[in-house]
Amino acid sequence: MTTDLYTVISNKQVAPSIFSMTVKDHLNLPVQPGQFHMLKTLAAEPLLPRPLSINDVENETLTFLYEVKGDGTKNLAALTTGQQLRITGPLGQGFNIDGIVGNARLPKVLLVAGGIGIAPFKYLARSLAKKATVSLAAGFRSNPYAIDDLKEFVDDIKIATEDGSYGVEGRVTLVFNPVDFDVVIACGPTPMMRAVKEMCKQAKVKCILSMEARMACGIGACLGCTIRTTKGMLRVCADGPVFDANEVIFND
Ligand SMILES: Cc1cc2nc3c(=O)[nH]c(=O)nc-3n(C[C@H](O)[C@H](O)[C@H](O)COP(=O)(O)OP(=O)(O)OC[C@H]3O[C@@H](n4cnc5c(N)ncnc54)[C@H](O)[C@@H]3O)c2cc1C
Ligand code: FES
């Protein structure tokens, strides 16, 4: 893990409020899918960097896919080619590819994305391709995004939109049945993660969650990002963000 200045290669809007930013990866540190980086522009405010998952790692570049929510991501969206920003990473425990694939030949892996929860799945799907049969179930409020990026690495894509503008109308949990898979991996809003965990528990299918929490330090020091687990309070930034769903205790 290092902190350094990185140079923006491109930063483009791919959907309403959704941006894809690629930076030159001059350090070339090894990055696991599911790990994240803390990003901060050179603006004085906001003071704290913001966590973003690795969307892709390719040809000495790092790509982040992000939704503009507040000042931190608004500043990121304003960056243009050639500008610099401060990035710390890679951070956290990502997806264990060998653990997901196990001893099975081409196990069936389902990635379940809720909105911007799709961000870590491109690099994950790229890492799983040829080792597993990968399917994607993605849910969006309205227009889907980032789907074309994944087509190269996944065998099957199902989409749900809450307004019915594309794919099945309703929640993403309508478009898959966990019994059809060996492993289900989910990233998205908490109600979706809770529902996916419950569906997998009923179906007795292994489930892995990439959790989110508000973060301050991002390196395990401030305890600001802890979640309840069967092993006690764990830090999303240092012990996760990837957790076995059986460990995660959702608040009622
Ligand atoms: C490990 C990890 C990986 C992440 N990866 C991505 C990613 O790849 N792409 C992406 O778009 N976002 C990602 N996020 C969420 C992202 O960090 C937040 O959206 C961002 O920090 C918001 O900063 P802001 O200054 O723009 O908004 P703020 O002004 O800080 O907040 C604006 C609104 O967003 C909500 N919010 C802020 N942070 C979070 C959070 N962590 N979870 C849920 N709601 C939040 C706030 O409650 C508030 O309503 C990730 C978060 C974590 C913890
Ligand atoms: S953000 Fe400080 S411990 Fe996780």
Image (spheres, grey):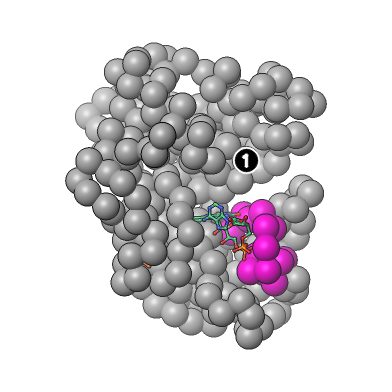
Residue 16 versus residue 62 in the image, above or below: above
Answer with the quarter of the image where residue 63 lies. Answer: bottom right
- Where is residue 192 shown, x and y percent of the image? 51, 32
Q: Is residue 74 magenta?
A: yes
Number of dots carrying numbers: 1
**What secondary structure is marked by label 1?**
helix
Residue 51 versus residue 248 in the image, above or below: below
Residue at x-position 45% and y-position 54%: 213
Residue 178 versus residue 236 in the image, above or below: above
Region of the chain picked out in magenta, as a range: 64-77
Query: Left or right: where does residue 137 sit relative to residue 229?
Result: right
- Where is residue 171 shown, x and y percent of the image? 61, 24
Residue at x-position 65% and y-position 73%: 8
Q: Residues within 10 Å of mark 1 (few under 14, many from 20)?
A: many
Answer with the quarter of the image where residue 159 lies. Answer: top right
The N terminus, quarter of image:
bottom left
Q: Is residue 87 visible?
A: yes
Q: Quadrant of ligand 1?
A: bottom right
Q: Is residue 2 magenta?
A: no
Answer with the quarter of the image where residue 47 lies. Answer: bottom right
Residue at x-position 67% and y-position 63%: 70
Residue at x-position 54% and y-position 40%: 189
User: Three-letter amino acid code at disc 1?
Assistant: Gly
- Where is residue 55 shown, x and y percent of the image? 54, 53
Residue holding disc 1: 115
The C terminus, quarter of image:
top left
